[in-house]
Image: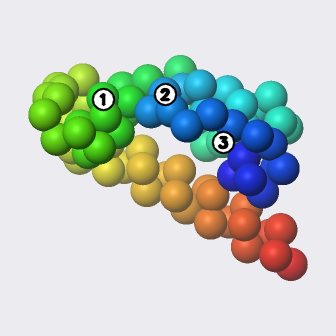
Amino acid sequence: MLTLLRQDFPRTHQLTELARLVVDAGGTPPLAPEEYLPLTPFAVELRYDDVETDLMTREQAGRVAKQTLDWATQQVDKAAG
């Protein structure tokens, strides 16, 4: 989304920070930036595979991820015309 909004962004696992950047650029993610906070450990765990988390169940994380992916897909499709 940040690329679509033509915004530079850092390489980070901080999903809250990335969501805030989307908002700052005029985007409207499906969740408030702070609602992505419990997903950040999942990003780290998937990347490094040695960090464990129980802040959110996998089912909850899956719902949030699907909701966000659906939103992003709609935004890209709309921009593509």
Task: Identify the image's colour scheme: rainbow, by chain, secondary structure or one colour.
Answer: rainbow
In this rendering, would 32 be left or right of 60? right
Distance of label 3 from label 2 (alpha carbons): 15 Å
Q: Residues within 10 Å of mark 1 (few under 14, many from 20)?
A: some
Asked if 40 appears above or below 81 in the picture, the reply is: above
In this rendering, would 26 be left or right of 46? right
Q: Residues within 10 Å of mark 2 (few under 14, many from 20)?
A: some
- Mark 1 lies on a secondary structure that is helix
The amino acid at mark 2 is Gln
- Which badge, 3 or 1, is on the more N-terminal residue? 3
Q: x, y percentage for residue 12?
A: 51, 33
- Mark 2 lies on a secondary structure that is loop
Rendered image quadrant of residue 32: top right
Distance of label 3 from label 1 (alpha carbons): 20 Å
Q: Which residue is mark 2?
A: 14
- Which badge, 3 or 2, is on the more N-terminal residue? 2
Q: Which residue is mark 1?
A: 41
- Mark 3 lies on a secondary structure that is loop
Q: Which residue is mark 3?
A: 29
In this rendering, would 63 be left or right of 54? right
Residue at horizontal 53%, vertical 50%? 68
Distance of label 1 from label 2 (alpha carbons): 9 Å
The amino acid at mark 1 is Pro
The amino acid at mark 3 is Pro
Image quadrant where one finds the C terminus: bottom right
Viewer-proximal residue, 56 or 50? 50
In this rendering, would 61 be left or right of 54? right
Quick check: can you spot residue 36? no
Residue at horizontal 85%, vertical 38%? 26
Residue at horizontal 32%, vertical 50%? 62
